[in-house]
């Protein structure tokens, strides 16, 4: 018998070439999908970090305002106490050092008032009335 060399099937090379090309395109699409997913994941992570930073800033602002309100309230309390002590001291000093005197003025004469007294003094002095 005679040995026959195996013959390639018709179109086998082209079929293998097309299959390799499809596999390469499939790998390229998979890589594009993976890169797209990675970008989306990175954007999601960045947005999450920005959101967390904004929340942290809001919390810090809230805590700062709360501490300032507490400080202002404490200072107002101290000022009220100091003002109360000062007023009490003034009242005590007024009573101790300078007792209140009641001065009563009594009008002399007929009570005609200032105008009547002026007219009378002019009349006696020879002035015009």
Image (cartoon, rainbow, N blue to C red):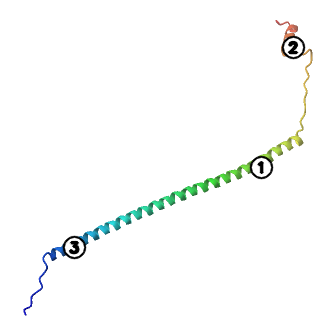
Q: Which residue is mark 2?
A: 117
In the rendered view, tell whether residue 122 sits above or below residue 9.
above
Q: Residue at x 54, y 57 (%)?
A: 57
Residue matched to label 1: 81
Q: For the residue labelled by badge 3, is the local secondary structure a helix, a strand or a loop?
A: helix
Determine which quarter of the picture holds residue 12. bottom left
How many neighbours does mark 3 have within 10 angstroms: few (below 14), some (14-19), or many (20 or more)?
Answer: few
Res. 19 mark: 3
Residue at (82%, 43%) from the top-left corner?
90
| Res. 43 image quadrant | bottom left
Q: CA distance from mark 1 to mark 2?
A: 54 Å
First-in-chain label (3 vs 1):
3
Name the mark nearer the viewer: 3 or 1.
3
Give the distance between the C-alpha atoms of the residues marked 3 and 1, in whole angstroms: 92 Å
Residue at 12 percent across and 85 percent down: it is 6
Residue 71: image location, x then y, percent: 67, 53
Rendered position, 8 above or below 103: below
What is the secondary structure assignment of the residue under circle 2? helix
Task: Using the image as rendered, state which of residue 25 and residue 84 is in the foreground.
Answer: 25
């Amino acid at each position: 018998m005679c040995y026959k060399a195996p013959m390639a099937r018709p179109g086998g090379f082209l079929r293998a070439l097309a299959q390799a090309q499809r596999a390469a395109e499939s790998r390229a699409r998979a890589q594009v999908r993976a890169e797209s997913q990675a970008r989306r994941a990175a954007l999601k992570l960045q947005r999450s970090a920005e959101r967390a930073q904004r929340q942290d800033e809001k919390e810090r602002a809230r805590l700062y305002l709360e501490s300032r309100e507490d400080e202002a309230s404490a200072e107002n309390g101290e000022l009220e106490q100091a003002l109360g002590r000062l007023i009490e001291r003034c009242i005590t000093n007024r009573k101790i050092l300078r007792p209140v005197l009641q001065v009563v003025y009594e009008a002399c004469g007929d009570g005609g008032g200032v105008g009547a007294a002026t007219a009378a003094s002019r009349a006696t002095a020879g002035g015009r009335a």
